[in-house]
Amino acid sequence: MDQPVRTYSSGMKARLGFAINANIKPEILIVDEALSVGDKVFRLKCNAKINEIVESGVTFLFVTHSTSVAKDFCKRGIVMKQGKMILDDTCEKAADFYEKMVAEEIEKKEKDKEREGKGETFQ
């Protein structure tokens, strides 16, 4: 704490930000991928604190690409694409939908690369 924040690593900044926001008794706690940084002990402490916050009735909005982590915390899942909501369902169904959507996009990109390599044109 005696060092300027500009000298902190990204993990240290995430820890500080999470600690401040999780302990101010928020009405809504928004976490954006912050749980993906830090070591295992930090992530376990975050998980315990989030569970405590959620149990106290605080609204928890978790923004992530990690469906497994989302399933640990969330009951409801919203999938967005290009700024638009495309699915609002249970977290399990939203995670499955998102994983399928990502797999399809990867497959499409691979097919497009193959076509480019063969000199085919496509739109």
Image (spheres, helix red, strand yellow):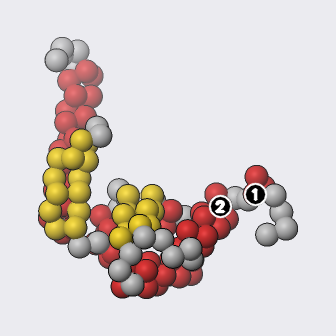
Q: Would residue 97 be visible to someone looking at this image?
A: yes
Left-right relation of 72 to 25: left
The image quarter containing residue 84 is top left
Residue 5 vs residue 118, the one in the foreground: 5
User: Which residue has dot 1 on it?
Assistant: 5
User: Which residue has dot 2 on it?
Assistant: 13
The image quarter containing residue 3 is bottom right
Do tag 2 and tag 1 residues touch (Cβ < 8 Å)? yes
- Decide: is 67 above or below 52: above
Q: CA distance from mark 2 to mark 1?
A: 7 Å
Residue 97 vs residue 15, the one in the foreground: 15
- Decide: is 24 above or below 103: below
Q: Estimate how packed mark 1 is, as few (under 14), some (14 to 19) or many (20 or more) residues with alpha carbons within 10 Å.
A: few
Q: Estimate how packed mark 2 is, as few (under 14), some (14 to 19) or many (20 or more) residues with alpha carbons within 10 Å.
A: some
Question: Which residue: 27% across, 28% down?
Answer: 113
Judged from this view, the residue extending furthest toward the right is 2
Query: What's under tag 1, amino acid-wise?
Result: Val
Left-right relation of 11 to 88: right
- Decide: is 100 above or below 106: below
User: In what quadrant of the picture does the C terminus appear?
Assistant: top left
Residue 32 vs residue 25, the one in the foreground: 25
Question: Which residue: 60% across, 64% down?
Answer: 17
Question: Which residue: 19% across, 36% down?
Answer: 108
SS at badge 1: helix
Residue 73 at x, y = what percent?
A: 33, 75
Residue 4 at x, y = what percent?
A: 81, 58
Left-right relation of 86 to 6: left
Residue 35 vs residue 87, the one in the foreground: 87
Residue 1 at x, y = what percent?
A: 79, 69
Residue 10 at x, y = what percent?
A: 64, 57
Mark 2 vs 1, N-terminal side: 1
